[in-house]
Amino acid sequence: MIKSETFDFLAELKSNNNRNWFNENKPRYQEAHQNVIEFFDALIDEMKKIDNIENESGKKSLLRIYRDVRFSKDKTPYAPRLSGGLKRATKWLRGGYYVHFEPGNVFLGAGFWNPSPADLKIIREELAHDAQPLRDILENPEFNSLWGEMRGEQVKSAPKGYSKDHPNIDLLRYKGFTFMKSFSDKEALSEDFLFETVKAFIGIRPFFDYMSEVLTRHIED
């Protein structure tokens, strides 16, 4: 379980985002960090029962709380969240999972955040040829109720090589293919949250299976 003390620390960090406060509260950060590591360790164990996950430990799955402010207008030194991702293993299984703990902003993410130019080209070629399999997934009531609409950065008009009048231009505009599922703080702090996380990640499988088949169809063994 995620502890209420973990959220208390993150909430206070957001209001006291400076090095002096952080250093004075370093033991609280270490406890919160360890709490989330333990959640990810348990999540990895559960996910490996249903998927081929590359991650070996919760500790190595978490993002750093220390921000790189060199090229940012926001100079606050810490990200007031504890989060991390899981990656599917082997070249045949595509897609990634993400869990974000932040008071008032708890969510799961899944999909393709920044596909390589080569992968994006393949996806667009497939969608230009036949987008119906993806539409069937996105319009499935069970899938839609679990994950909602597909998100991701889009080009404003049409990607290079495609007409803005293409019948599948609504999908061809996407540069990333992601989904987000939000939770209340109360839900995140419940003993059922690990179960709900795994349930949601199982539910994204039709999308991952489709994308993996598209992206690996021409890969040789």
Image (spheres, rainbow, N blue to C red):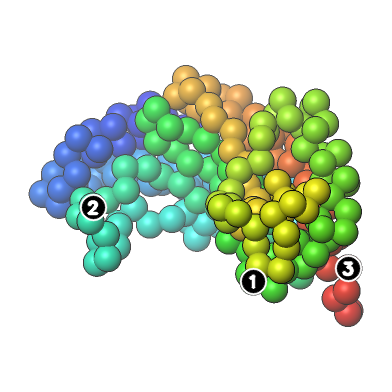
Amino acid type at circle 3 is Arg
> Which residue was labeled with disc 3?
217
Q: Which mark is residue 42?
A: none
Q: Label 2 neighbourhood size at 10 Å, few (<14), some (14-19), many (20+)? A: few
> Which residue was labeled with disc 2?
74
Q: Nearer the viewer, mark 3 or mark 1?
A: 1
Q: Element type at marker 1?
A: helix
Marks 3 and 1, the one that precedes in the sequence: 1
In the image, 165 versus 40, the foreground residue is: 165
Amino acid type at circle 2 is Asp
Task: Determine the CA span between mark 3 and mark 1.
Answer: 17 Å
Marks 1 and 2, the one that precedes in the sequence: 2
Task: Determine the CA span between mark 1 and mark 2.
Answer: 29 Å
Task: Answer left or right for 184 relative to 5.
Answer: right
| Residue at (10% x, 49% y) in the render | 20
Marks 3 and 2, the one that precedes in the sequence: 2
| Residue at (74% x, 52% y) in the render | 165
In the image, 136 versus 56, the foreground residue is: 136
* 37 w.r.t. 140: above or below: below
Indicate the quadrant containing the C terminus: top left, top right, bottom left or bottom right.
Answer: bottom right
* 31 w.r.t. 166: above or below: above
> Which residue was labeled with disc 1?
117
Amino acid type at circle 1 is Pro
Q: Residue 140 in the image: x percent, y percent?
A: 82, 31
Q: Element type at marker 2?
A: loop
Task: Determine the CA span between mark 3 and mark 2.
Answer: 43 Å
Q: Residue 134 in the image: x percent, y percent?
A: 82, 46
Q: Residue 22 in the image: x percent, y percent?
A: 19, 47
